[in-house]
Image: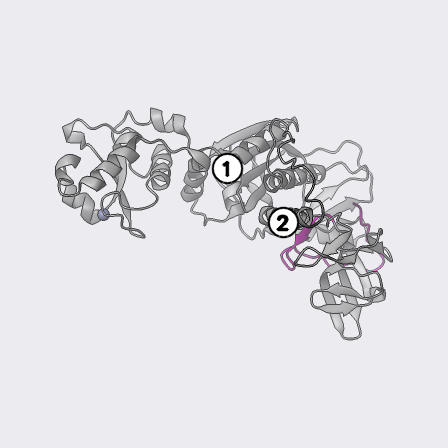
Amino acid sequence: MSQVFVVDTAKRPLDPVHPGRARLLLKEGKAAVYRRFPFTLILKIEIKEPEVQPLRIKLDPGSRACGIAVVNDATGTVVFAAELSHRGQKIKAALDDRRTHRRSRRQRKTRYRKPRFQNRRRKQGWLPPSLESRIANVLTWVKRLSRYAPITAISMELVKFDMQLMENAEISGVEYQQGTLAGFEVRGYLLEKWNRTCAYCSAKDTPLQVEHIIPKGKGGSNRVSNLCLACEPCNIAKGTQDIAIFLKKKPDVLKRIQAQRKAPLKDAAAVNSTRWALFERLKATSLPIECGSGGLTKWNRTRRDLPKTHWLDACNVGTSTPDMLITKDVVPLLITATGHGSRQMCVPDTFGFPKQHKTREKTFQGYMTGDTVTAVTPKGTFHGRIAIRHRPSFRLGKIDIHPKYMRRVHRADGYSYEKGVVVLLPMPEGSGTRTAH
Ligand SMILES: [Zn+2]
């Protein structure tokens, strides 16, 4: 079960507790709500020397979403799980939009100026803003969770395939078959390399078998360069024939396979620049980092009979994964990066002409766009993220609500949280909510 984070009076992280225990602490007035997302309590009684069990934060960074899990290695308990959705595409779209508007404005107004599009330099290690935001999102959450839980180590999935393991594992004969860790790596690698199609007939969406291009009986090795994927009919038809004989009537297919088998998998599929950059920045947090490959994650997950989700993948990253992972009743918190709004003071229409101007203030009556509120109105109770206006009528979903009906439960922090996923504990009478930021 997802547990509840607890901090002491000095805001030092303590062991997370079961939601039932958290409810009791609130009911007895021994703790107050410190933060809503992730749900965290603050104790009201002072603890001299808190003893805590070390936890590990595990990350499965992807291009769209990053799986996050906080695991107790000693007990195998998954304390917290989350799926963090990035906003890379939105950033790219916004920048593209701005670029076209500026370009058209330069065309209209300052055509006489000398072009100066090549006088800019990029710092070493520069990444496009869309990728930079992914790294920043993950770093934010690692730091944030370290504040509420006693985290002492990080595990992250760094590479998709462990090339070292694949090379070494080729010595023994049956390793290429599914069932061993090396086999997992090799299969995953081959699927990527041969685009999940049969090398001989280009059949898609069919079970594929690992095939030796030069048969083993004719001196072919188990090296990855001698392996390809074939559908069952092709595999049986080829049998132990030499590839040149099998593809005698299809010289173009033979030529393609000969070229493709030699070409190692390069580009984004094998090495991911964002992951490496994230790894470098995580090193700066001074927590020890363990790295795993995608093949290892899949191997761990399949052995524990768990379905594929971002957060379960995160739980299974690295060799430190406990043999028994307790994932029962764990509900992941769905986090979506929303950003902190834009600094643009002028809002252009679709053609790039000024439509309206924003005010200098970002708040109105103490509320800000992105705040999560509960509104109790004569028409009913509503809950969610608001968008403010500079008059007492805010947007909540598709309706307008006066701020006098609202109570803030979480301040805007650049993320939105899926409603109903987190166990919202009942608020006992009289115990005030302490919201900290
Ligand atoms: Zn085939």
Kind of element beneath mark 2: helix
Is residue 238 shown left or right of residue 22? left
Residue toward you, 191 or 32? 191
CB within 8 Å, label 2 to label 1: no
Whether the residue carrying mark 2 lies under 8 Å from ligand 1 is answered with no
Q: Magenta segment range? A: 413-437
Instruction: Report the residue at 78% width, 39% height from top.
Output: 8
Residue 100 is marked as 2
Q: Position of residue 6 (x, y in %)?
A: 72, 43
Residue type, numbered disc 1: Val
Q: Position of residue 64 (x, y in %)?
A: 54, 47
- Whether residue 431 is in magenta: the answer is yes
Check disc 1 and report the residue beneath it.
Answer: 317
Is residue 9 shown left or right of residue 83? right
Q: Position of residue 252 (x, y in %)?
A: 21, 41
Residue type, numbered disc 2: Thr
